[in-house]
Amino acid sequence: MRACLIPLRTFPRRPDENFAELERRLEEAARFAPDLVCLPECTLTGYLYEEKDFERFAEPLDGPTALRLADLARRFGVFLCAGLLERAPEGVYDSALLFDRRGDVILHHRKIEEKPPFLRGRLFRSAPTELGRLGVLICGDLFNESAARQAVGQADILLVPLARSFAGRSPDSDRWAEERQAYLEAARPLRATVYLVNALEVGVEEPAFGGALAVGADGRLLAESPHGSDQLLCVEAAL
């Protein structure tokens, strides 16, 4: 099984440009014949949290963003995990969808560790697939007691889309050296292979800093895409 993590170079609030970049990166990843592709949190919009941005960019699960992502999963024949701003009748969630090779949604996760004006999800679920049981946590969910407790032993592979930045200066290699260890320690109790991928935001004051990690079920770092980069990370694992 091959997984490709794409730290997408993202211009917040410019989804059409980000989609074009995503298509280009998927063409690049296709050379490795991946079975599974994971993309960052809020993939096509960047991480947005103001009400005016919700009005403009949040969409229902059958909206154009989900349809475009489903088409990519079909076109490239991959399981595809991507984040989006989900508009529901009760409000907006920071969500992720997992599509199968046919472009069907097989898993929908709402971020549990989130702040207003977002609503918070509550449940972790996994989906049985030909690759094993796949589950999704979003960014801070990895450090949320309820989310982590629900996830323990419930997935063979956990996908973790992020849009993580540092206050003040981002990227910051020294701070990342410390934070990387926190991710490894948080992943270890989950008893799953964990793939984390961060957006590389452009043109904002404190941008998400890119990079990706592959962590073994024993909490050991398997592979890494450099901090501050959008370098593709492709890893191979036994089924």
Image: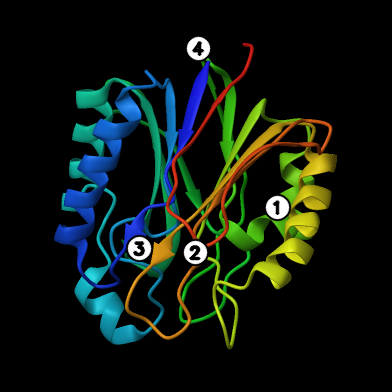
Q: Earlier in the sequence, mark 2 or mark 3?
A: 3
Q: Quadrant of residue 42?
A: bottom left
Q: Which residue is mark 1?
A: 147
- x%, y% of residue 8? 37, 53
The dot on residue 163 is 2
Q: Which residue is mark 4?
A: 130
Which amino acid, by three-letter code, is at mark 4? Glu
Q: Earlier in the sequence, mark 4 or mark 2?
A: 4
238 relative position to 233: left or right: right
How many other residues sit within 10 Å of disc 1, few (<14), some (14-19) or many (≥20)? many
Q: Which residue is mark 3?
A: 85
The vertical placement of 17 against 190, above or below, is below
Dot 1: element: helix
How many other residues sit within 10 Å of disc 4, few (<14), some (14-19) or many (≥20)? few
Q: CA distance from mark 2 to mark 1?
A: 18 Å
How many other residues sit within 10 Å of disc 3, few (<14), some (14-19) or many (≥20)? many
Dot 3: element: strand
The vertical placement of 102 against 194, above or below, is above
* Residue beneath the point at 24% across and 32% down: 27
Is residue 152 in view from this perspective?
yes
Q: CA distance from mark 1 to mark 4?
A: 24 Å
Q: CA distance from mark 3 to mark 4?
A: 28 Å
* Residue beneath the point at 57% across and 58% down: 227
The dot on residue 211 is none
In the depicted view, which residue is nearer to us: 65 or 110? 65
In the depicted view, which residue is nearer to us: 221 or 127? 221
Dot 2: element: loop
* Residue beneath the point at 74% across and 60% down: 143
* Contact between labelled residues 1 and 2, with CB atoms less than 8 Å apart: no
Q: CA distance from mark 1 to mark 3?
A: 19 Å
